[in-house]
Amino acid sequence: MSRLPLKILLSAALMLGSMASAAEPAKATLERGEYLATVGNCAGCHSAPGGEAFAGGLRLSSDYGTFITPNITPDADTGIGAWSADDFYRAMHEGQRADGSPMYPACPYPNYSHVARDDIDAIHAYLQSVPAVEQDQPDHDLGFPYRYRSLLTVWQALYFEPADTEANEQKSKDWNRGRYLVEGLGHCDACHRARGRFGAMNDAADAPGAQIHGWYAPPLTDPSQAGLQHLSIADAAAFLQSGKREHAAMLGPMADVVFESLQYLREDDARAMATYLTALPEQSVDSPLRLIRMSEDGRQTAMSEGREIYADQCAGCHGDDGQGGNGAPALAGNRAVTMDYPLNAANMIREGGFAAATADNPRPHGMPPFYDLDSRELAAVLSYIRGSWGNDAAPVTATNLRR
C-alpha cells in the first residue's frame, strides 16, 4: 500500500486542527449566549405556561391591553429563524423588527440597548441553536390608540434613544459590571419603575414601582421597600441567587425571576449586581396608593378582629410573636408587610404561593391561600400584622384592597 506524501499528511493535520479550533469558539459562543439569555430571562417572557421554551404565547396584561409574546425559536415562518445577526441587533438595540416595523416597549429594548454587540450576537447564536417550534401568535389585544403599531414611530422619537453604557472610571470593575447587568440584560427597572401614560419610563429619582401581574414591584432605591442598600454585598448577592434570607423570601413574580434567571448567576456576576444595587442612592418613595384614613375606633375594631383571625389561622406558622420559624418568614419587621402599599401582603394571604426552588432553598416553604376570608376580614388581619410586634404601618380598609 502506497504511503501519502508528507506534505499531504501535514496539510490534513493542519486542516483538522483548524476545524477543531473553530468548533471550540463556536461552542463557547453558544454557552455564553445561553448564559446571557438566562440572565436576561428570555425564556421567562417567551414561554407560555405548559408551552415550548422560547415559542412565545405568554399573555402580559397591562394598562394598555394584553401583549402576547412572540416566538423567538429559529422557525423560519413563525419565529426568528430568518433573522440575521444584524436583524436581531436592531431589535435589541433599536426596537425595530426584521421587517422594519417598530416594536412595542413591552419588550424592554430600552434596557437592551445598553448591551454590547458581541453579547447580543452570542444570544442570537444561542437562540438559533434551540429547537425550532412552529407556533404563530395572535395579535396583541390592545385598546385605542395603542393598537396602532405605526404610532410607535412617534413614541420612539419622543421617548427612546439607544444608549450604550460607558464605564465609569471613578467606580470599581464590579460596580460597572453590575450596572451593565442591572440596567441592561437584567432590565430591572422595566418592572421596578413606574411608567407614564404612554408607557415611557418614569426616570424621576423618587419614581414609584410598577404593578406586574397584579403584584407591586417596589422601587430599588428605597431600602424600606425593595432596596438592598442596608445589606452587605455578600448577603445581597446570596439573596439574589437564593431568593431568600433568614425569615424572608422573594415571592410572586419575583420568585419566578429567581427560579428562571437569578439563581444561575455566576458568583462574580451576582457580586457585581449586588455591588451596584447596594450602592444605589437611597430615596424615600411614596406609595402609588393613598390609604384611606381610619378613625381610632375603626382601627381598634380592625385590630381586634384581625388578632382573632391571626391566632386562628396564622400563628401556627408565623408564631404568636410574628417571628416565624421552621421555614415561615417573620412578619415582625418584614418590609413586604409594612410597605405603604399593602398589595403584595394581601396577595400572599389571598392567593398563597411559594418562594423559588434554588440550590440554597431546594424545598421552599409554601403559603396556602385563604380564599375563605372576605375583603373586610382580609383588611382586618392585614391591619393587625401591620400594627403588631413593633410594626408601625397604617391600617388598611377593604376599599384599599379592591383590584
Image (cartoon, rainbow, N blue to C red):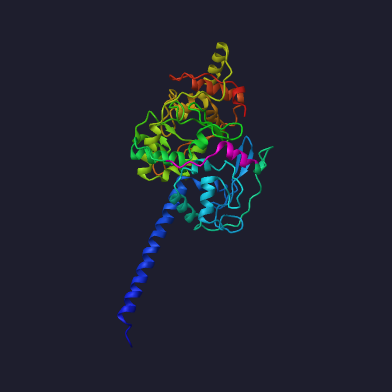
Residue occupying the far left of the picture: 6
Q: Is residue 308 above or below residue 50?
A: above
Residue 153 magenta-drawn? Answer: yes
Q: Check the image and name the residue furthest to the front.
A: 157
- Relative image position of residue 398 (x, y in whole percent): 61, 22
Q: Can you tell which quarter of the image residue 351 is in?
A: top right
Q: Nearer the viewer, residue 38 or 187?
A: 187
Is there any visible trace of residue 353 in the rendered image? Answer: no
Who is closer to the viewer here, 259 or 302?
259
Q: Would residue 328 be counted in the magenta stretch? A: no
Taking the spot 30% from the left edge, 80% from the top edge, the residue there is 6
Image spot of residue 119 (x, y percent): 44, 50
What residue is at 58 percent from the left and 39 percent from the top?
Answer: 157
Q: Quadrant of the N terminus?
A: bottom left
Answer with left or right where residue 295 lies relative to residue 225.
Answer: right
Q: Give the number of callouts.
A: 0
Q: Quadrant of the C terminus?
A: top right
Coordinates of residue 4 in the picture (x, y in percent): 33, 83
Q: Which residues are magenta?
A: 151-165
Q: Nearer the viewer, residue 222 or 3?
A: 3
In the image, is residue 353 above or below residue 15?
Answer: above
Question: Is residue 198 visible in this depiction of the protein?
Answer: yes
Magenta stretch, main secondary structure, is helix
